[in-house]
Amino acid sequence: MDVALPGCYAWADRQGGAAMPHDHGHDHSELDDMTARVMALETLLSAKGLVDPAALDEIIETYETRVGPRNGAAVVARAWSDPEFRDWLERDATAAIGSMGFTGRQGEHMMAVFNTAERHNMVVCTLCSCYPWSVLGMPPVWYKSLPYRARAVREPRAVLAEFGVTLPEGTSVRVWDSTAEMRYLVVPMRPEGTEGMSAEDLARLVTRDSMVGTGLALAPEAA
Amino acid sequence: MNGPHDIGGHHGVGPIDPATHHGHYHPGETWEPRAMAITVAAGFGGHWTIDESRFAREDRPPQEYFTLGYFGIWLAALQRLLAERGLVTEAELAGGPLENGTVPPKACLSADQVAAALARGGPVDRDPGGRQPAFAPGDLVRTRNLQPRGHTRLPGYARDKVGRIAHVQGFHAFADDSAKGDRAAAEWLYTVVFDAETLWGMAEGAGDEVTCDAWEPYLERA
């Protein structure tokens, strides 16, 4: 078989590849090794007709620019401002969210969980890294980390403290361990002093972490 | 399996440090997005289920699981899946010349198919065909003490524990069987809520709870 080297190594060249300075304690030969290994795998799979390098660019680009927490923020802001939509979101989150154009991979089966003064919801996947990609994009490194996965279920309040969140007296915590294909979107409490704000302005108060339950929505003066 | 991935509730794992780890990838690790995309694209080839890929990630010695790093595990699992199915050979993965006679791929996701494929995803709800859920919201259930060698999605911390059915979520592909390549097996799926005290001996705060999503074979009436 004739192997054309796919013209896809811009990703390594663009970034300066292995020569790129980085800020944590990895051995450089290890980074070189991983870069070389991924390049070799991409070349092999491309030659076998298993992956198309242009499709890889498209997947990366999708989750860098088009599918991310702004999707979820739009859902939350609408739920805050439109009672009918809020009810739909509570009854059938997959359909309600899908009606806004947010569907698909790792968001096929959605449930929205609503924070109240009595209950704060928080989401984890202790067994791997399940996360609602269709509304929040890719999970952050901390969400996939062993410390978050190990601790969120046992000591959610200590975890919240590391995110700078202290819950008021009388608020209980429910941690949702995403052990199947249900994906959970936390709808944070609407901040005070936001009466009359447009859904677009409200969406700016909705952080990614507030939709995982490790944060709260921002106060209007903080946004 | 009683594997290294099942770490919910473990002590001594250190701080989370969200300010440092807020990105999708580690800074400077330009291979990580590429590894993500290769894995996602290859998954659309239809040669394995999502549960087979999860098992390929978790089924490895703890020292490996804890040192490969997140996307390092993805790569190791992808290579195993590719070789197991004969799509590539071990020699090719080791850098050897291309060989003839490997299994031809069923599909190759092209750039113009990406948006539609991601927007479609892979729904796992199936037709229950008249099967009714055995439990209803409010029912008390006990999780079975299941410890299979294969893939399962009942975390160790939630085995043999009494909880309450909070939601009937649908009739979904059953992970334990799907991880063996059985695409037809499906079961009723429930969200079960446990008191934190039941799981950990004590609760960090009054009224704190943890939920797991559990298929019917994981549960018996309490």
Image (cartoon, rainbow, N blue to C red):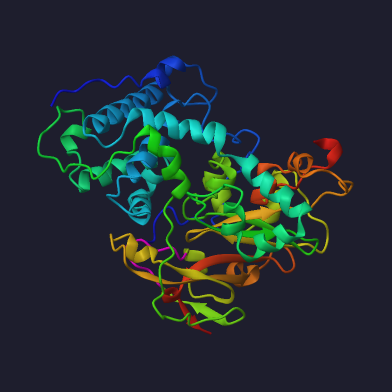
Q: Which residue corresponds to the image point at 39% horizontal and 56% vertical from the top-left?
A: B3
The region drawn magenta spans B146-154
Residue at image x 33%, y 69%?
A: B185
Q: Which of B168 and B157 is in front in this view?
A: B168
Viewer-side residue, B203 vs A194: A194
Outermost residue, left side? B101
Residue A167: % across, % down = 78, 55
Residue B37, by quadrant, is top left
Is residue B110 covered in magenta? Answer: no
Residue A53 image offset from top left, x and y in percent: 34, 28
The answer to which image quadrant residue B209 occupies is bottom right
Vertical side of B88 occupied by A150: above or below:
below
Q: Considering the image in quadrants, where does the N terminus of chain A appear? A: top left
**In the current view of this chain or complex, which residue is farthest to the bottom?**
B222
Q: How many badges with numbers are in the image? A: 0
Q: Does the magenta stretch include residue B151?
A: yes
Residue A74: horizontal and vertical position, in percent?
68, 45
Rendered residue at 70%/44% (across/down): A163
Q: In this view, does B162 lie above or below B105?
A: below
